[in-house]
Image (spheres, rainbow, N blue to C red):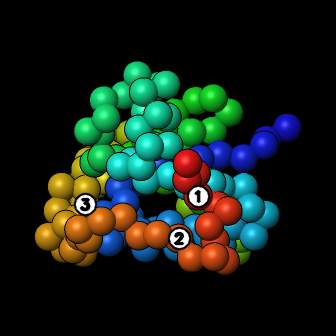
Amino acid sequence: METGAIILFDGICNLCNSVVRFVIRRDRAGYFKFASLQSAAGRELLSLHALPPGKNDSFLLLENDRLYDRSTAALRVTRHLNGLWPLLYGLIVVPPFLRNGIYDLIARYRYRWFGRKETCDVPGPGIREKFLIP
């Protein structure tokens, strides 16, 4: 039985924050929790899975005690969203070197294209329970 998953994201990246809001709106089952990579909870999860604390250039998904990154993480997230979004999971058949190549290009330029914040957003009262905040 699936009990939920944690999405780790770059909390100062505008694109990443937009993706988190997108997922929250489409995750009516409440499957996902969130932690920014810069937060204490995010750093602790990185440490538990032997990833360096500066690994803020990736979108990570912790699901069933397994850590997924980059395009695989993003595609696995789509499986749990409402609407037609789960159909995107079919792209998992595309070889990872192709999927991750596109992912890496976007990740490399995300601050330039979408901007960044000086600090992480503080979740509002309606969604605060979805975030791992110490």
Q: Nearer the viewer, residue 10 or 60?
A: 10
At label 2, which amino acid type do we have? Pro
Q: Give the Cα distance between marks 3 and 1.
A: 25 Å
Q: Earlier in the sequence, mark 3 or mark 2?
A: 3
At label 1, which amino acid type do we have? Phe
Which numbered disc, 3 or 2, marks the residue closer to the eye?
Answer: 2
- Identity of the residue drawn at 50% across and 52% down: 35
Q: Earlier in the sequence, mark 3 or mark 1?
A: 3
Question: Dot 1 lies on which element?
Answer: loop
Residues at circles 2 and 1 in contact by the CB criterion of under 8 Å: yes
What label sits on residue 106 in the rendered view? 3
Q: Give the Cα distance between marks 3 and 2.
A: 25 Å
Seen in the picture, residue 58 relative to 50 is either above or below; the reply is below
In the picture, measured across the screen, residue 37 lies left or right of residue 124, that is left
At label 3, which amino acid type do we have? Ile
Q: Residue furthest front?
A: 134
Residue beneath disc 1: 131
The part of the image, by quadrant, that contains residue 16 is bottom left
Camera sees residue 100: yes
In the picture, measured across the screen, residue 13 lies left or right of residue 61, that is left
x and y, in percent, of residue 57 in the image: 28, 48
Seen in the picture, residue 83 relative to 86 is either above or below; the reply is below
x and y, in percent, of residue 91 in the image: 50, 53
In the picture, measured across the screen, residue 29 lies left or right of residue 134, that is right
Q: Give the Cα distance between marks 2 and 1.
A: 8 Å
x and y, in percent, of residue 39 in the image: 41, 49
In the picture, measured across the screen, residue 105 lies left or right of residue 3, that is left
Question: Dot 3 lies on which element?
Answer: helix
